[in-house]
Amino acid sequence: MERNDTWMFSVITIAQQLDYERAHDYLLTVQATDLGTPPLSNQALVNVTVTDNNDNQPIFTQQSYSARVSEDIPIGDSVIQVTATDLDSGNNGEVSYQIERGDRHQQFYIDPSTGTISVSRPLDREMVSSYVLQIRATDNGIPRVSNLAMVNIDVLDINDTPPLFMQSNYTAIVQEDKKPGWGVTKLTVSDADIAPNGAPYTFEILSGDVGGTFRVEPDGMVRTAAKLNYKLQSTYLLHIRVFDNGSPILYSDTWLLVKVIEESQFPPSVSPLDIWVGAYLDRFPGGEMGRVHATDPDQYDTLTFGLATKTPLFNINPVDGVLTAEPGLDTGRYNLNVTVTDGKYTSHANVRVTVEAVWEDMLQQAYSIRLNGITPHNFILSQRKGLLRALKSTLMKDTALISVQEAKHGYLDVLLSVKGGVEVERFNEALQSIGLNGVVLNCECLNEAICRQRIQLESERILTFATDVTSFVAPAHTHDLYCACKLGPTAAKEIVSRSCRLRMRGGRRFACPSQRARLHCLAPPLCSSDRPNHTCPPAAAPPPLAPPSITSSMLLDHLARAVSPSASL
């Protein structure tokens, strides 16, 4: 409060935030009272007018709008109207609309004053089936304030595209001895329209089939309706029409040339198949075993494969003859009678499946060699038996092939197991006697440690190498190098238990502990360290070896000489 010689002044201030949208003006009654006795007072009216500020944004009646229109909607027709209100007054409350995004081809127009969205260009559901427009509502205040809403527009299909054949002309060949109902060919049809304007289709043979020899099924398969006779008629030219399911009904045409040939003259020729399966730990996960090969001199015969006796353990693909086995196949020998028919003749072939278990002790007696310049299929077909015979003749022990796999740079890894085991030196002598390189390992081990190779089979990664007459199915294998230490009072015993192994990592050199170390072998051979009772393997079962590199030509030449010294290739 202020005063001068005549008047006293009082200032009215704002106690709370004013809001124009709640109250445009206020009429205040102000009373002044003196301090006399008795006090006297007087009143005055104060009219406070609140001016508007652009402090509100436009608000849409919905955050998301939806509309459905037919794709043949005329240009200029309205689709939907969006509405936004602004609580501000005057220019601050005036709202205008615009399409912010979602209309790449400018097919819609929005009235900036009313918010009515209309079509500005023709719609085509086959090109764009739906639109999501982002609409911005902006007021006319300073500064301008805006808000967004989404408009989803689905374009409804009309039957405006006909069904189309994949080809305008088809050709098929049928033997005259086929029974009615034989599949001639499959007509493929597509329609850009969606249901119910597309499928299901209706086919009609318009001409070329006077006697009703053919029929077309709803899926487009053309079949014979009667037995054909090459001598009576050798060709048919069918004019075929397809109708869609829409309204109005649309259609398109194609032509099918059917050539009738003489009946089958020769039976199929089937090759017998010998399959060997290696089941690691007597567990086979199942899978592809090989493929039965069959030929037919009749050029246009279609061969179908099958099993003469159904079995739950094996299946054969009727089209390509691929034979598969179910999981849990027991060890033993299985004989399968495979049938191949061309529709008239049926041929048979024997498929012999031999399943053998691969145990851990076989890996301890295994040796890995590496061949160069030979494919696994060629090795299985032409060199496997010769290599095994040559090693058996030299070592005087049975040798088994337990894994074959392709390696990098065109090499082939072959994993062999010698029954009863054999020393490294003796195995090298056997290799060299048939003209192959010996095994050389280089781990750079120290303190008299011995370089060894550890081999493991990957039971879930089964490799199948199949030829026309034989197939080899076995797990893939991995190998890494480690240093086996000779320590303690029984230094001749090799420590190879897990706690005693010093594995190779990244080419680094590893040294065995010295004689004074706590790690040592006891008798009977137990590996002892901070963890006692780790059994060492028998001396007669040396670990596998790293693969030497042998070329395919070397192997062929020396196998021939080893098996028959006078043989020549």
Image (cartoon, grey):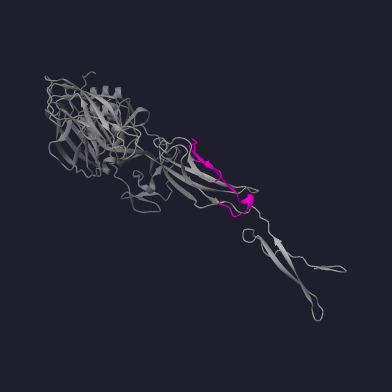
- Which percent across, then down, holds residue 513? 43, 45
Task: Check the picture and name the quadrant holding the N terminus.
Answer: bottom right
Residue placed farthest to the right in the image? 5
In this rendered view, identify the residue nearer to me: 528 or 253.
253
Marks counted in the figure total 0
- Which percent across, then down, holds residue 360? 27, 43
Residue 315 picture quarter: top left
Q: Is residue 441 left or right of residue 175?
A: right
Residue 452 appears in the picture as rendered:
no
Task: Check the picture and name the quadrant holding the C terminus.
Answer: top left
Residue 231 picture quarter: top left
Q: Is residue 92 magenta?
A: yes
- Which percent across, then down, holds residue 165? 29, 29
In this rendered view, identify the residue nearer to me: 499 or 123.
123
Q: Is residue 336 magenta?
A: no
Q: Is residue 143 left or right of residue 277?
A: right
Residue 345 picture quarter: top left
In this rendered view, identify the residue nearer to me: 557 or 524.
557
In this rendered view, identify the residue nearer to me: 164 or 425.
164
Residue 410 appears in the picture as rendered:
yes
Please provide the residue range marked out in magenta: 85-113
- Which percent across, then down, holds residue 216? 21, 31
Residue placed farthest to the bottom in the image? 37
- Vertical placement of residue 160 versus 84, above or below: above
